[in-house]
Structures are given as C-alpha cells and as structure tokens.
C-alpha cells in the first residue's frame, strides 16, 4: 500500500487544502492528513478544533485519515512507512522554503519523496492567514473554506458587522 502524508497546521483548513487532499488521494492508496502540533506557532484554533475541521473536510475522501503529530515530519513519515510527502506550492515565492524542506526531509528519510502539487487556479492566492484576516475583518469567507470552518468562525463571533 502506497501511503502519502499531507502535513500542515491547517489553522484553519481552507478549500485549497481540501483540493490538494482530493487530488493527492487519487495518486496514493492511503492519504494521511497530519495536523501539526508545533509549539513554536501561535494557533488561532486549538489542536482539537483543527483536527475536527480537517476531519470534516476529509470525510468524503475514502482513503484519507486525519491524525495529529508532533516532532519531525520525517520521523512521522518513517513511522507510517509513507512513500511520499505532499506539499502545496501556490507561487514561486513558496518554492525556496519548500525546496529547503524537501531537501532536509530527503536527508532524514530517503524512503519518501516530496511531491509538490500546484493548487487549482481558483486557490492560488488562498492561505489560512488570508482567511483569518478576511474573517476577522468581517469579510465573507464562504467561498474560501469548508462550511464547518465558516460555522466555527461564526460561533466564535469574530465577524464584525
């Protein structure tokens, strides 16, 4: 069974993330969507909320599972016996950082290749940071995120009139 890992903070999960999940799931027998627990980042959503929202977004993808992980992605990839790490590239500006990560992951876990996927054109500009900024300033995020994420923002009362 060929397993791929799609890791991220998903704070929050966006339609761009969901698009990559669907496309990666078609390329591999099993897709593990791994929600990072890095203590270096300040998250808007708790780990439990992020897992719930990602699981909701991935619920219709038959070969996808959602888990959390901490520590090095390379160690998690080895533990899962994955053959690929999925990374999204939105723009040329993402490439240098992602290339460095891919080379380091190759150094740490030679058994897995990094697979870069370009987003669908309608999601090229989309990021979790942009979603948070739009939502916090009262903008409409309904076309940017899965419905559960939109509902969570509404319950948080972050939208200003």
Image (cartoon, grey):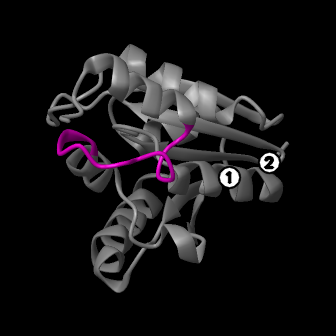
Q: Is residue 111 visible?
A: no
In the rendered image, residue 53, in percent from the top left (x then y), is placed at 50, 26
> Please, is residue 101 above or below residue 122 in the view?
above
- Residue identifier under label 1: 83
User: Could you give the CA–CA distance between mark 2 and mark 1, rounded to whole angstroms?
Assistant: 6 Å
Q: Which mark is residue 137?
A: none
Task: Pick whichever, 95 or 19, lies toward us.
Answer: 19
In the rendered image, residue 26, in percent from the top left (x then y), is placed at 82, 55
Instruction: Name which quarter of the figure residue 29 lies in.
Output: top right
- Residue identifier under label 2: 2
Instruction: Name which quarter of the figure residue 79 lies in.
Output: top right
Task: Pick whichever, 75 or 65, lies toward us.
Answer: 65
Q: Are marks 2 and 1 in contact (CB under 8 Å)?
A: yes
Magenta segment boundaries in residue numbering: 135-146
Q: Is residue 135 left or right of residue 83?
A: left
> Please, is residue 19 above or below residue 5 in the view?
below
Instruction: Name which quarter of the figure residue 33 lies in.
Output: top right
Q: Is residue 120 visible?
A: yes
98 falls in the magenta region:
no
> Please, is residue 24 above or below residue 76 in the view?
below
In the rendered image, residue 41, in percent from the top left (x then y), is placed at 17, 36
* Mark earlier in primary sequence (2, 1): 2
Under circle 1, the secondary element is loop
């Amino acid at each position: 069974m060929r397993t791929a890992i799609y890791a991220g903070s998903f704070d929050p999960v966006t339609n761009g993330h969901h698009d990559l999940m669907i496309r990666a799931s078609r390329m591999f027998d099993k897709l593990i969507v791994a929600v990072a627990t890095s203590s270096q980042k300040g998250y808007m959503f708790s780990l439990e909320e992020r897992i719930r929202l990602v699981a909701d977004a991935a619920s219709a993808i038959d070969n996808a599972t959602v888990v959390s992980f901490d520590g090095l992605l390379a160690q998690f990839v080895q533990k899962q016996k994955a053959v690929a790490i999925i990374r999204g590239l939105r723009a040329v500006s993402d490439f240098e950082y992602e290339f460095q990560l891919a080379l380091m992951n190759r150094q740490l876990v030679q058994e897995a290749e990094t697979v870069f996927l370009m987003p669908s054109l309608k999601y090229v500009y989309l990021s979790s940071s942009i979603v948070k900024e739009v939502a916090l300033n009262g903008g409409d995020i309904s076309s940017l995120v899965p419905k559960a994420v939109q509902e969570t923002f509404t319950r948080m009362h972050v939208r200003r009139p």
